[in-house]
Amino acid sequence: MAVELVEELKKRILLLDGAMGTMIQRMGLTAEDFGGEGYEGCNEVLNLTAPERIKEIHLSYLQAGADIIETNTFGSTGLVLAEYGLRKKAYEITLAGARIAREAVRIYEEETGKHAFVAGSM
């Protein structure tokens, strides 16, 4: 995959997706979507509680022309997740974020025949 990315970069400028948090806010999600009031604002927990919504965002960026989408994992470190009592779920949330992004790329590639990439967000 890294070789493919380098080869593609030799040919053209690649576009990254936009802000995940802004897109999540626009969805008007409820406390229930986050898994309860105590988790509201923890966008990364949506990888577990609302994965289809995250995949929907990824697909919208791909359909808009992004070549690279970032995982919904910017705040999935133990330090950040501890604020929500989710420190022990850091690995699970991060892995889910990567899987969701890869699934979105798979769907996009299947539907369009175009190639796209996933970048981890930290």
Image: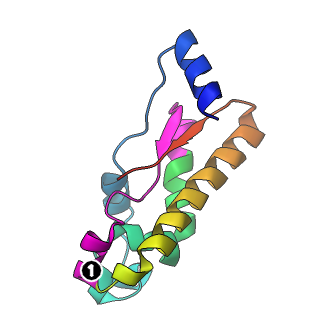
- In the rendered structure, does residue 64 fall within the stretch colored magenta? yes
Which residues, given as a range, are shown in magenta? 60-84
Task: Name the image colouring.
Answer: rainbow
The furthest residue to the top? 11
Q: What element carries label 1?
A: helix
Vertical comparison of 92 with 12: above or below: below
27 or 117, nearer to the observer: 117
Q: In this view, does 79 lie above or below 19?
A: below
The residue that appears at 54% across and 12% down in the rendered structure is 10
**Which residue does the image show at 54% across and 57% down from the upper left?**
98
Name, please, the residue furthest toward the left: 83
| For residue 122, above or below residue 14 | below
Residue 99 is a magenta residue? no
Residue 92, image x, y percentages: 51, 74
**Position in image of residue 29 (x %, y %):** 38, 72
Task: Please state, as top left, top right, bottom left or bottom right, where the N terminus lies in the image.
Answer: top right
Left or right placement of residue 22 versus residue 64 in this view: left
At horizontal 36% and vertical 66% (from top left) the residue drawn is 76
Q: Nearer the viewer, residue 26 or 99?
A: 99
Residue 96 pos. (x, y %): 55, 67
Percent of width and height locating residue 33: 43, 79
How many callouts does the rendering have?
1
Q: Which residue is drawn at 34% across and 80% down?
A: 87
Residue annotated with mark 1: 82
Are there few (<14), some (14-19), or many (20+) residues within 10 Å of tag 1?
Answer: some
Name the amino acid, label 1. Ala
